[in-house]
Amino acid sequence: MGRTTIRCAVVFVLSCLFVGSSRGEEWTQLKFDARHSGDAAGRHVSLPLGLVGAVPLTDAIFTAPVVGQGRLFVVDGSGVAACFDAATLKELWRFSARGGKANCNNVSSPALVGDYLHFGTTAGYYYVLNAADGKVIAELDCGEPIFAAPVAANGRVYVFTLGARV
């Protein structure tokens, strides 16, 4: 995949997300909440949408980023998690997940739960990172790919593997 494609994916994601983040709204998991319904009837997007900025990443983005604590969190296709200041787009930290070539085309969107960023990889690893500095809090080898986004509800975080392990 070329640099232009990667840059375009990042530009699209950032231009969509910063409409909500500029107002201070937090979208801490895929499709807003634990229901992942995408129902955002109480929210308003001001038109026209526009480009706020672009940041270089290591691969294309297939996941939905999350916004919280004044920061933007994203996981790219090769399992690299990155954190940016939502107002300035300054990169605050970057973390590369293990897995080598098995870590490709990641589609598990991250979830921000309190002070921790959760995400899974196609290489079968599940991570909990400190959202402030990207340091690993936990790394679980699930033994099979993780395609679904984590779900945070009722004081727990749930993750599902390709083989339906919870």
Image (spheres, grey):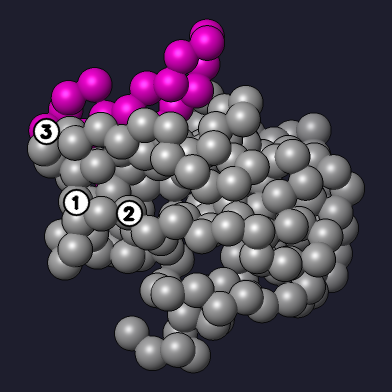
Identify the residue at image location x=44%, y=27%: 151
Relative to 18, say whether 145 is above or below.
above
Q: Secondary structure at mark 2?
A: loop
Give the residue type that dot 1 points to: Ala
Rendering coords of residue 61 (x, y %): 45, 66
Residue annotated with mark 3: 163
Q: Earlier in the sequence, mark 2 or mark 3?
A: 2
Q: Secondary structure at mark 1?
A: loop
Q: Earlier in the sequence, mark 1 or mark 3?
A: 1
| Residue 29, visible in the rendered structure | no
Give the residue type that dot 3 points to: Gly
Q: Is residue 63 left or right of residue 18?
A: left
Identify the residue at image location x=67%, y=46%: 67
Q: CA distance from mark 1 to mark 3?
A: 13 Å
Q: Which disc number belongs to residue 123? A: 1
How crowded pointer 1 is (Cα within 10 Å; few <14, some 14-19, many 20+) is rated as many
How crowded pointer 2 is (Cα within 10 Å; few <14, some 14-19, many 20+) is rated as many
Q: Quadrant of residue 83?
A: bottom right
Q: Is residue 152 left or right of residue 17?
A: left
Rendering coords of residue 59 (x, y %): 40, 74
Identify the residue at image location x=25%, y=33%: 140
Residue nearest the observer in this picture, 78 or 7 = 78
Give the residue type that dot 2 points to: Ala
Residue nearest the observer in this picture, 139 or 46 = 139
Rendering coords of residue 127 (x, y %): 36, 39
Q: Which disc number belongs to residue 97? A: 2
- The part of the chain drawn in magenta is 147-166
How crowded pointer 3 is (Cα within 10 Å; few <14, some 14-19, many 20+) is rated as few
Image marks 1 and 2: residues in contact by CB distance under 8 Å = yes
Q: Quadrant of residue 114?
A: top right
